[in-house]
């Protein structure tokens, strides 16, 4: 178990290092980037509260169905959906929101393809994976995570860390107890329990959405 923890820590550090190198190599004028972010925040502020939904590109049928239910129920409860715009869990969440008549947004990288359930007017292109991650976490009122790979793991760890600095500590809900329980145990070894009161482990999207709606009552 200690070896697993060490490997996860090293992989996370390597990911952050690569992101740093990528960001430094971007030839985008700072003023242009700031203008883009400002207009994007204005776009977000005119919409309902945003919930980021993250997870793997190749989910099981059950996880795909659960993500679609999450997108649907969130939209029905007045929330807007934000994803990385790709296939799998992201597509399922956007699909659920669309079926419910809700608002759905994709944060996309250059040369990536939007999934078919995101309106062509509702996407925002960023220069790097790290930029996308920062925007999704900084601009959301909560995060629901489904099983995935190292990218999903990094997103969850980033959300856990960054949400600690926001006064109301937005909720992070991990769907899939069997999959996420080892991570919860690992995080509890890193953080004092009182700092993880916004982290929840559930087995269904219905429970996840109920936590979010109750959190902001």
Image (tube, helix red, strand yellow):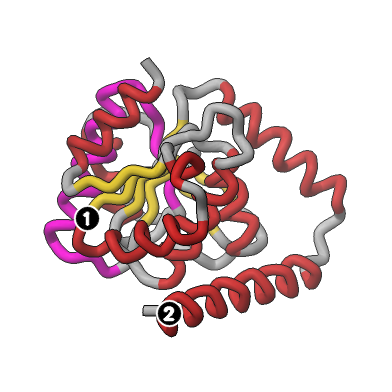
The residue sitting at 49% across, 23% down in the picture is: 47
Q: Is residue 107 visible?
A: no
**x, y percent for residue 89:** 30, 56
Q: Secondary structure at mark 2?
A: helix
In the displayed image of the protein, which residue is found farthest to the left?
62
Report the residue marked by disc 1. Answer: 176
Residue assigned mark 2: 2
Q: Which residue is painted at 21% across and 41% down in the image?
A: 205
Of the residues under marks 1 and 2, which one precedes in the sequence?
Answer: 2
Assign a secondary structure to mark 1: loop
Quadrant of the snapshot with the C terminus: top left
The circle drawn on residue 140 is none
Q: Residue at x 29, y 60 (%)?
A: 180
Q: Is residue 8 above or below residue 118?
A: below
Mark 1, residues whose alpha carbon is within 10 Å: few (<14), some, or many (≥20)? some
**Cα–Cα span, label 1 and label 2:** 23 Å
Q: Main secondary structure of the magenta part?
A: helix
- The residues colored magenta run 58-83
**For residue 119, which quarter of the picture?**
top left
Q: Are there few (<14), some (14-19), or many (20+) residues within 10 Å of tag 2? A: few
Please state if 132 lies on the left or on the right of 27 as rendered: left
* Vertical placement of residue 1 versus 122, above or below: below
Report x, y in % for residue 141.
Answer: 48, 32
């Amino acid at each position: 178990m200690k070896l697993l923890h060490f490997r996860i820590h090293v992989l996370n550090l390597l990911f952050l290092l690569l992101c740093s190198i990528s960001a430094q190599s971007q030839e985008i004028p700072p003023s242009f980037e700031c203008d883009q972010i400002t207009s994007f925040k204005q776009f977000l502020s005119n919409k309902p509260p945003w919930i980021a939904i993250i997870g793997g590109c190749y989910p099981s049928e059950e996880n795909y169905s659960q993500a679609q239910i999450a997108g649907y129920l969130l939209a029905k409860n007045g929330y807007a959906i934000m994803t990385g715009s790709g296939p799998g869990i992201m597509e399922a969440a956007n699909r659920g929101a669309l079926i419910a008549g809700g608002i759905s947004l994709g944060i996309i990288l250059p040369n990536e393809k939007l999934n078919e359930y995101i309106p062509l007017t509702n996407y925002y292109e960023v220069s790097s994976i790290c930029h996308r991650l920062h925007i999704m976490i900084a601009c959301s009122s909560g995060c629901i995570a489904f099983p995935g790979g190292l990218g999903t793991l990094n997103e969850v760890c980033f959300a856990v860390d960054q949400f600690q600095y926001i006064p109301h500590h937005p909720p992070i809900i991990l769907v899939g107890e069997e999959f996420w329980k080892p991570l919860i145990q690992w995080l509890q070894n890193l953080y004092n329990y009182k700092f993880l009161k916004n982290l929840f482990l559930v087995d269904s999207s219905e429970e996840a959405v109920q936590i979010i709606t109750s959190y902001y009552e």
